[in-house]
Image (tube, grey):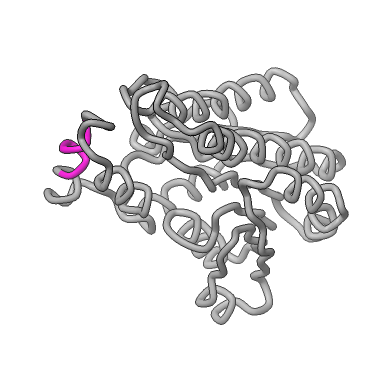
Amino acid sequence: MKAIITGHSRGLGAALAAELLGQGAEVLGLARGSAAGLAAQYPGRFREVALDLSDAQAVAAWATGGALAAFLEGGEGPVMLINNAGTVEPIGPAGTHAPEAVARAVSLNVTVPLLLAEAFIAATGARADRRILHVSSGAGRKPYAGWSVYCTTKAALDHHAATVQEDGLPGLRITSMAPGVVDTDMQATIRGTPEERFGLRDSFVSLKETGALATPAETAARMVAHLLGDAFGAAPLTDVRELG
């Protein structure tokens, strides 16, 4: 089995890559940074490409240039795309965001996942088992003051999964999954936001202080178990906290 993972160099993305590698998958990571530990531990099955995933033009050029299709060729078992990379910024009331911050968030959270999904689907049309996992958020399913951009972009991923499922493409399973609250750099960004820009800041601080955040490894294990299971794709929207 083979998997392409965006944002693999840290946090949940690194944990997802490690979990899949531990189960014997070949993994191709896409990110600006490098996962040196994974490269050293799995030299035969782990590759990475340095890409700015907020640069849709650069990602499109890579995705359609043959490298994506070449990685996915051959082998046995499922081929997978995990759209994990994303940003919670800009945070604050609508009308306070710089245009370039909005554009970067939409590119990273929506445009790039969709164009990678298009390239992945086109490249795997003959495969009997191909799977796409969007890493979404509960914020895509419930509005939060201060997160107008983040909530909107995650809702877009949810709707993309639901719509692609309606296409009924042979061999393709797709799900947009909310991972719950995970102890990553994104959570640190939220806790570091002034309360006047995000009124729920203190509740996220409390989650950290009370040990209520899941670890990336714990969350990745549950996500990968579902990704590789027979039930994956039965529902276009899922939540880690609701998995059996």
Q: Is residue 49 visible?
A: yes
**Majority SS type along the magenta span:** helix
- Total numbered circles: 0
Residue 68: x percent and y percent?
79, 54
Q: Is residue 95 shown above or below 108?
A: above
Q: Is residue 8 shown above or below 95?
A: below
Q: Is residue 244 left or right of residue 15?
A: left
Residue 217: x percent and y percent?
38, 58
Question: Which residue is painted at 33% across and 48% down in the image?
Answer: 189
Q: Is residue 232 visible?
A: no
Magenta stretch: residue 167 in it? Answer: no
Q: Is residue 229 left or right of residue 44?
A: left
Residue 128: x percent and y percent?
78, 41
Residue 62: x percent and y percent?
79, 53
Instruction: Give the camera-side residue of 55 and 84.
Output: 55
Instruction: Give the camera-side residue of 32 and 114.
Output: 32
Question: Which residue is painted at 54% across and 26% down in the image?
Answer: 158
Question: Which residue is painted at 77% across and 36% down in the image?
Answer: 118
Magenta region, residue range: 200-205
Q: Is residue 237 left or right of residue 185?
A: right
Q: Is residue 141 left or right of residue 153?
A: left
Question: Which residue is painted at 55% across and 54% down in the image?
Answer: 7
The quarter of the picture where the C terminus appears is: top left
The quarter of the picture where the N terminus appears is: bottom right
